[in-house]
Image: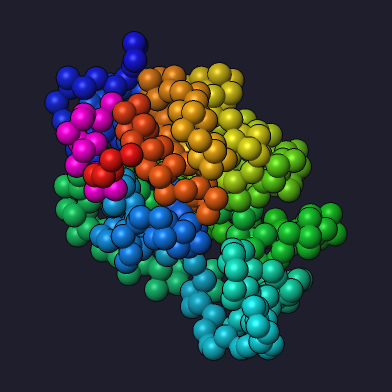
Amino acid sequence: MPNSVINPDKPALTHRERFRRLMHFQTVDRGIHWEFGYLAETIERWEKEGLPKGFRRYEGKCSVEEYFGVDPHYLLVPIDIGLQPPFTGEVKILKQAKDKRIEEHPDGTIMEVKTEGVRTIPHYLKMPISGWDDWKRFKERLNPKSPERHCFDYQALNEKFRHANVPVGISLGSFFGVPRNWIGFEQISLMLYDAPDLVEDIIETLTCLYEAVLEPALREIEVDYAGGWEDICFRSGPMISPSMFRSLVAPRVKRVGNLLRQHGVDIIWTDCDGNINDLVPIWLECGINCMFPVEVHAGSDPVQLREKYGHDILLRGGVNKRALSQGRKEILAELKRVEKLVADGGYIPGVDHRVPQDVSYENYRYYIREKLVMLGWKKEEIESVEGLATEF
């Protein structure tokens, strides 16, 4: 690729060096090979079509990622941004049917869980927070000063992270996604109008917690990126209006973004499915500069985002999963569509969510091989990938 950041003649880089350089639009020896993951049903299908049995769904030893040569992702600096102490106790089975059951969890959540067929997101029947009294039970478990949150010796851990050859990351948390999980989609949408002070108190409490636990870690350890999540968008756009997000959520996101940048962290991403286009400019204003997984069919196109925001935006994902369920011609066309972003830098291509079960094993193998060629992997590197060892 002419004018590409990929230069195969460059000396081999560590994964950490490659990540840092690529995400700052500098030349690299080859592109980064990351994938989002796979549905359990996809792995079950692939095992019938040639995938050796026994591989796990998630990265690491004996995982599907390792089998397909996926690069090591990162080393995470430990922080505690969860409920402390967490709600504990047994999950009660309220009703059991042939293909589903209704569970009550210790925090008060009641959900219907499928036990047969495609098993994805549960159907929530009752959420744990519906008003101030419920919120008080949670708020007392989000105290930034809880001793349990500050048990990490970051000075000692610094030696481990300083010598890491993979990217060093830290969790950013979620500002609206977490409250949505506790309150529910419909309920929080109404609460934004009926009890905005409650929603604001939840977001402010989370922000204070993030600031309190991030600062001591960042003061001691050099961090390459911060990663958070929201998952608050659908095909039609975000579940909260951009104007409301800008006034209620953005100032808190910006506070944490400023803290990260003060400590040299300038690669900051959020994981948000769906059509994110209306929220992207707000995130960029707040310091969130990397979008992931950029779901194409939902309307989030990495090519269009780069054309609109230039090098102000970094991208991960953005390969339309629907193309992988078609044929080799369509798969290759989809890779060609994002090839100029690979050449431009600041982009790590991958399937734009977990690989669904309508993608055949051979189609995925073909996709991986052609993606590695696009990323500038050498012939011997591609041939060393276990999942590509047999002929197509």
**Residue numbers of the magenta segment:** 375-387
Can residue 261 be seen from the camera position used here?
Answer: no
Q: Position of residue 345 (x, y in %)?
A: 38, 24
Q: Quadrant of residue 308?
A: top right
Q: Position of residue 147 (x, y in %)?
A: 40, 73
Q: Position of residue 324 (x, y in %)?
A: 50, 40
Tell me, yes or no, whether the highlighted magenta stretch contains residue 61. Answer: no
Q: In which quarter of the image is residue 100?
A: bottom right
Relative to 354, is 113 above or below? below
Q: Quarter holding the C terminus? A: top left
Tell me, yes or no, whether the highlighted magenta stretch contains residue 376. Answer: yes
Q: In this view, does 131 lie to the left or right of 86?
A: right
Residue that extends furthest to the right in the rendered view of this protein: 194
Between 3 and 249, the residue placed more toward the observer is 3
Relative to 62, is 353 above or below? above
Between 41 and 112, the residue placed more toward the observer is 41
Task: Please give the name of the residue rendered at 46% of the width and 59% of the height, measured from the top-left corner.
Answer: 45
Task: Please give the name of the residue rendered at 59% of the width and 64% of the height, measured from the top-left corner.
Answer: 118
Task: Please give the name of the residue rendered at 52% of the width and 84% of the height, measured from the top-left corner.
Answer: 88
Looking at the image, what colour scheme do you see?
Answer: rainbow
**How many numbered circles does the render carry?**
0
Relative to 136, is 350 above or below? above
Between 197 and 2, the residue placed more toward the observer is 2
Can residue 157 be seen from the camera position used here?
Answer: yes
Q: Is residue 373 left or right of residue 205?
A: left
Q: Position of residue 183 (x, y in %)?
A: 71, 66
Q: Is residue 38 left or right of residue 253?
A: left
Task: Please give the name of the residue rendered at 54% of the width and 88% of the height, measured from the top-left corner.
Answer: 90
Q: Quadrant of residue 26?
A: top left
Relative to 231, is 132 above or below? below
Q: Is residue 356 left or right of residue 3?
A: right
Q: Quarter holding the N terminus? A: top left
